[in-house]
Amino acid sequence: MPTGAILYVQVPNSTTSEDWARWRDAFVVSFDLGLDSYRADIGEERFAELLAPDWRFLSYPTLGKDSIWDVFPQSIFLEVNLGDSYYGPGYERGHLPGFIEHAEWFETNISESRVWYVDDCSQAAMVFDTRAREILLEYYQKIGHEPYHIKLEERAQWKPAQEACLRLWMLEQERVLREMRECDGL
């Protein structure tokens, strides 16, 4: 079974049921219930529930050894199962441009939100801010799905690009987490 991609959107503590309903309606309209052609096979009821607050999470994302709920005990998180395989260095499968489109929608439409990108296996939460998305998108544009589609013995040719992307991505994560510690008092 492929590793799935999930976004966690950290929303303001003052979120109301009216906010949830407004976000859900706007999301469904923005993505025309099809989320682009690559997602057209997922049914309408899936989208209707997408932004409903639901505390039965698919995954328990972590920052280091702690869950994000422990790190941010006063925060509310929205889980968005992207319904596709994860994409990242060493696992080049999912449709990253679509994931970025979702993350940008949340940042634009939910003020004071923070988006996290998680795979449903390792559950390591990665801040998915503009710079992190740029780093990953640049890698995607260079590499695409090629390492996944070639023979195992040929994958070594992609190792330097994977390592470079991971190094940049981890530096961005460290920078953002340092800022969070300073601003949020972590």
Image (cartoon, rainbow, N blue to C red):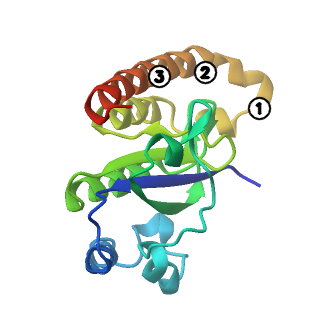
Q: Residues within 10 Å of mark 3 (few under 14, many from 20)?
A: some
- Which residue is more in the foreground, 91 or 65? 65
Disc 2 marks which residue? 158
Indicate the secondary structure of the residue bearing disc 1: loop
Q: Which residue is mark 1?
A: 151
Label 1 vs label 3, nearer the camera: 3
Q: Amino acid at mark 1?
A: Lys
Crowdedness of circle 1 by 10 Å Cα count: few (<14), some, many (20+)? Answer: few
Q: Amino acid at mark 2?
A: Trp
In depth, the one of 41 and 85 nearer the eye is 85
User: In the rendered view, would you say 108 is above or below 87?
Assistant: below
The image shows residue 85 at horizontal and vertical percentages of: 61, 52
- Badge 2 marks a residue whose secondary structure is helix
Q: Is residue 74 above or below residue 47?
A: above
Inspect the image, locate mark 3, and give the three-letter code of the amino acid beneath it. Met
> What residue is shown at x 54% (from left), y 76% (from top)?
42
For residue 116, what is the image quadrant? top left
How far across and how far down the image is residue 3, in percent? 68, 49
Q: Is residue 145 visible?
A: no
Residue for point 28% across, 59% down:
105
Position of 127 relative to 102 (above/below): above
| Residue 62 place in picture, x, y as percent | 57, 40
Q: Secondary structure at mark 3?
A: helix
Badge 2 crowding class, 10 Å Cα cut-off, few under 14, some 14 to 19, many 20 or more, is some
Rendered-image quadrant of the N terminus: bottom right
Check the image and report above or below for 60 versus 87.
below
Task: Give the residue at mark 3.
Answer: 170
